[in-house]
Image (cartoon, coloured by chain):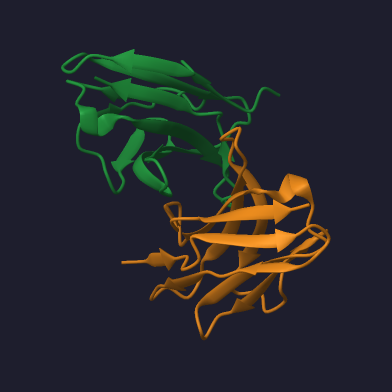
Chain colours: A orange, B green
Amino acid sequence: AQTVTQSQPEMSVQEAETVTLSCTYDTSESDYYLFWYKQPPSRQMILVIRQEAYKQQNATENRFSVNFQKAAKSFSLKISDSQLGDAAMYFCAYSGTYKYIFGTGTRLKVLA
Amino acid sequence: NAGVTQTPKFRILKIGQSMTLQCAQDMNHNYMYWYRQDPGMGLKLIYYSVGAGITDKGEVPNGYNVSRSTTEDFPLRLELAAPSQTSVYFCASSFPQDLKQYFGPGTRLTVT
């Protein structure tokens, strides 16, 4: 069975600094997707970034980028130039076909 | 496009009561999902559907039922509510090609 582990329950970052959130996963599948979702206090789940496992190039979306290490089964999220609006819960997720497995989340605090 | 809509936003149930959480999407997505999120935790899959008339169990299906008679709608039925079903429930949908999930705003359910 697939698992997703986020070992950092909480992280803090100064405004305008860079922070990296960690995620590891376990799977025997060769083709899959990995995602980072943001959940602000409003509770809405927002897709931040998506990585296809067959692509070696790391995905980027503006200030958000990932470090995808397929052999190590690691999928970290880097947030550059952190903003107050980035404060939220961040969930790492895995999908092999149509079922998703979510990690337990990392709460990110942004300090002014 | 309204995206994914859920009703109600909040509900309090007494133990043993039943209710249906409604979910609708207007993006013509094939796949639809129901999750629950317990406090401080990630999302756990209750049921999913890959198309009208096709549903299957996820990680935590006990105490719930679903149906999918149309592409747009995917209601979740709670029978004989129990305090352990107190949670926030999210509905989501996606295309099979990219698995980008779009989430509804959630329903906060309390069973007392």
> Can you say whether A39 is above or below B71 in the image?
below
How many labels, in total? Answer: 0
* Left or right side of A47 for A4: left
Of residues B80 and A27, which is closer to you in this image? B80
Side of A79 relative to A38 (left or right): right
- Residue found at x 41% / y 32%: B88
Residue B35 falls in which quadrant of the image? top left
Residue B105 picture quarter: top right
Outermost residue toward the front in this view? A112
Judge whether residue B30 can be spotted in this image.
no
Q: Can you tell which quarter of the image residue A2 is in?
A: bottom left
Query: In the picture provided, is B66 more to the left or to the right than A111?
Result: left
Q: Which residue is at the front of the view, A101 or B9? A: B9
Query: Which residue is at the far bottom?
Result: A71
Identified at 46% across, 34% down, the residue is B90
Q: Quadrant of the N terminus of chain A?
A: bottom left
> x, y (%) of residue A59?
72, 67
Observer able to see residue A88: yes
Looking at the image, residue B26 sits to the left or right of residue B62; the answer is right
Residue B108 placement (x, y as % from top left): 43, 25
Q: x, y (%) of residue B36?
A: 38, 38
Residue at x 70%, y 62% (from the top left corner):
A13
